[in-house]
Amino acid sequence: MIQNTVRISFILLFFLAFAAENFAQKAMICKPTALAALVPLPELKYDCDEDSDESEDAVLSQPNRRQALAFYARTLEKLTDAEWWRTPVEDLAVCDFLKKTGALTDEQRQDYEFSDYLYRLRGNGRFRVVVAKDPCYQTGFNGANVFLLNRVRGEVFAAEVIDGFYTRADFPLGFETASREQETIIEIATTSGGLYPSETYYYFTIDPTTKRAVPKKLFKEKGGFANQISSKAILGEPEEYGLPPRSEALRIIVNGRLARSFYVFEDTGEKFGDNSKFVRRVYKWNGRFYE
């Protein structure tokens, strides 16, 4: 899968096939320069409360967990090595998997493509998204916490941007940026996986004072403004859900710019052949936000 992925796959197998094709062309070799630049990502560690159910959100507020997350963010801010930042994340991931220079064998490539190495690290030379597995929350569903790193003149500023995320998919994660006037907007795209998948996209910008990521509330909803938006995902052609041909949801960043409008798919509760019937809801940019 190439750097700066714009869309995440609606079908996990399709996503993995797409990733396999691109990595086979571009990044299935651990290069000496990438191995030299490799810096192992830290692990999130804290003691699980034996009296708590890992599937309950009460785990998220445990004091030792909050302390561990704060410490983890400070640890990420030590990732200042210039070569690590200059090296494409795909190259780093292959070397992290192989641990030596050379090409992956067919068996290794199969293991790699179906592992979490595709998703632990995303980004570019300015921003990087780090996915930290959570040892005590939703471990059966890829429970994780997502951090966004901002590099400014050699310093790194880290912020936790998604707390307690989990998914039935093998953690496909999209990353993209857009420029608007003098502001950079960062998109992190996720999918729920499962038989009835949905997509949720999160948006952030950089606080000019702290230099850390903060939510960018782009969407007007009934309850106010939000930095995230969700859509039902399709597992086939749009027409199979009663949608117009070539319909696509959540095309919010296009060619590095915010789109003037985009669609989300909503379930009508009706049947359409073997699927649910979806409709498109349009959001339009009014100069300040989408509504």
Image (cartoon, helix red, strand yellow):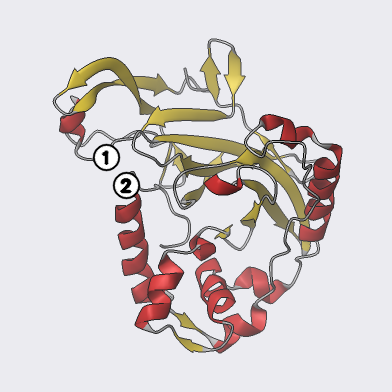
Q: Quadrant of residue 237?
A: top left
Residue 175 image position (x, y, % from top left): 51, 50
Query: Which numbered dot is residue 178?
Result: none
Whether tag 2 and tag 1 are in contact, CB under 8 A, the answer is: yes
**Front residue of this view, candidates 289 and 159:** 159
Residue at the far top: name it: 222
Alpha-carbon span between mark 2 and mark 1? 6 Å
Residue 185, placed above or below residue 172: above
Up-down: is 64 above or below 14?
above
Q: Position of residue 282 (x, y in %)?
A: 35, 21
Q: Tell me the kind of residue under disc 2.
A: Ile
- Residue picked out by circle 2: 11
Quadrant of the image occupied by residue 233: top left
Q: Residue at x 56, y 78 (%)?
A: 95
Q: How many marks?
A: 2
**Residue situated in front as seen by the camera: 53 or 239:** 53
Q: Is residue 181 among the parts visible in the rendering? A: no
Quarter of the image holding residue 55? top right
Q: Secondary structure at mark 1?
A: loop
On the rendered image, what quadrant is the N terminus found in?
Answer: bottom left
Residue at 59% from the left image edge and 73% from the top image edge: 87
Left-right relation of 29 to 38: left
Asked whether the viewer can see residue 275, the reply is: yes
Kind of residue at disc 1: Leu
Label 1: how many residues lie within 10 Å, few (<14), some (14-19) or many (20+)? Answer: some
x%, y% of residue 289?
53, 22
Residue on which the image places disc 1: 235
Dot 2 or dot 1, earlier in sequence: 2
Q: Residues within 10 Å of mark 2 (few under 14, many from 20)?
A: some
